[in-house]
Image (tube, helix red, strand yellow):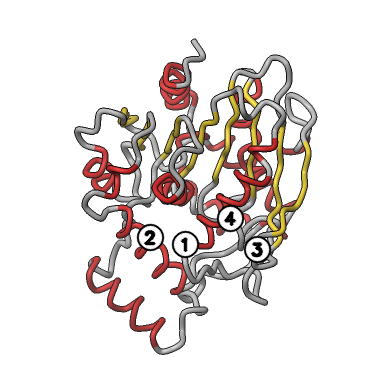
Amino acid sequence: MVWQDFPNLRRKGQVNYLTAQDGCHLRTASWPTDENSKAIIVLVNGHREYMEKYSEFITDLLARDLAVYTLDNRGQGLSDRLLSDRLKSYIPDFDLFVSDLDEYVSQVVKKDPRATELPICLIGHSMGGNICLRYLHEHPGHIDKAVLFSPMLGMTLGAPFKDHLARALISGLCRIGLGKAAFPGQAGRFSRAGHQAYMPKVTHDADRFRQETDFLDANPDHYVGGPTFAWLRAALISADEVMTPGYMDVVTLPLLAILAGEDTLVDNRMAEKIFAERANVKQVTIDGARHEVYRELDRYRDILWRNMDEFLALQ
């Protein structure tokens, strides 16, 4: 299991901390360029995730002679948690994620010795895809290409709530001071059984999912529970901002959007709407794949990698 070797995957990596402007400590990892590097990848993970979860994916990137930079988003992994109860997933505003990414790119990635000569590609999964689009809109000109997996541009809030009722409930609870509360049972401690029940939402690959379960069992400090109402409100506001008419007009770089055909966590219709008929965007739907396409069965991952290799001009 490659996570056991992190950060020394295909080659030796570095783990450091970046202090954001507001004092939040962000855990980062990097595999800087060498003489063989073809491009620089900045990897932004999704909700409740952490860098080690991407060990196999990072290993695949390194095998393609790509330098890699990544981080634990604030409130997740071993970056600073924002509440005293570290099991609650909390953020007051997604602007903080966007600001963190901007600081990371400008203060760390751009200081790679080959940053001025190699293309820089942003890769974001789910919540990370939302953050990446926000960053690209607010800070154009710093990134050459972008790849988004299952971007969170709309959420499937699910039964028993319809979307408008769920939004009203979440907003109302935040207004009366319950933003730091979570749905009952959503912010409990890690358990193997509870985590295993989540598998049908994210992947068909039992072996890859078991590796994550084993990791969290051995490293419980990386675990964060379900979202607070404040996180949900912030996520909805950020998704609505990206869906504003004309928002994508500023995002003109080449962009590859990969959607999971069986995604039940994000609303693919929003991505299909925002990317439709944009000359700079290639959209691919992997039929049958679940939300976490980067760690799906090989038959789905092979489609992902074929498209990525072509898009990044690696083949």
Q: CA distance from mark 2 to mark 1?
A: 6 Å
Q: Where does residue 284 sit, x and y in percent of width and height?
A: 32, 29
Q: Is residue 200 visible?
A: no
Q: Which of the marked residues, 1 or 4, is nearer the chain's N terminus?
A: 1
Q: Nearer the viewer, residue 138 or 304?
A: 138
Q: Is residue 202 left or right of residue 221?
A: left
Q: Is residue 224 above or below residue 303?
A: below
Q: Nearer the viewer, mark 2 or mark 4?
A: 4
Residue 21's label in the rendered image is 3
Amino acid type of the residue tagged 2 in the rendering: Ser
Residue 100's label in the rendered image is 4
Residue with the mark numbered 1? 94
Q: Nearer the viewer, mark 3 or mark 1?
A: 3
**What kind of element bears circle 4?**
helix
Q: CA distance from mark 2 to mark 4?
A: 15 Å
Amino acid type of the residue tagged 1 in the rendering: Phe
Disc 1 crowd, CA 10 A, few/some/many (<14, 14-19, 20+):
many
State yes or no: discs 2 and 1 in contact (Cβ < 8 Å): yes
Q: Which of the marked residues, 3 or 2, is nearer the chain's N terminus?
A: 3
Q: Nearer the viewer, mark 3 or mark 4?
A: 3
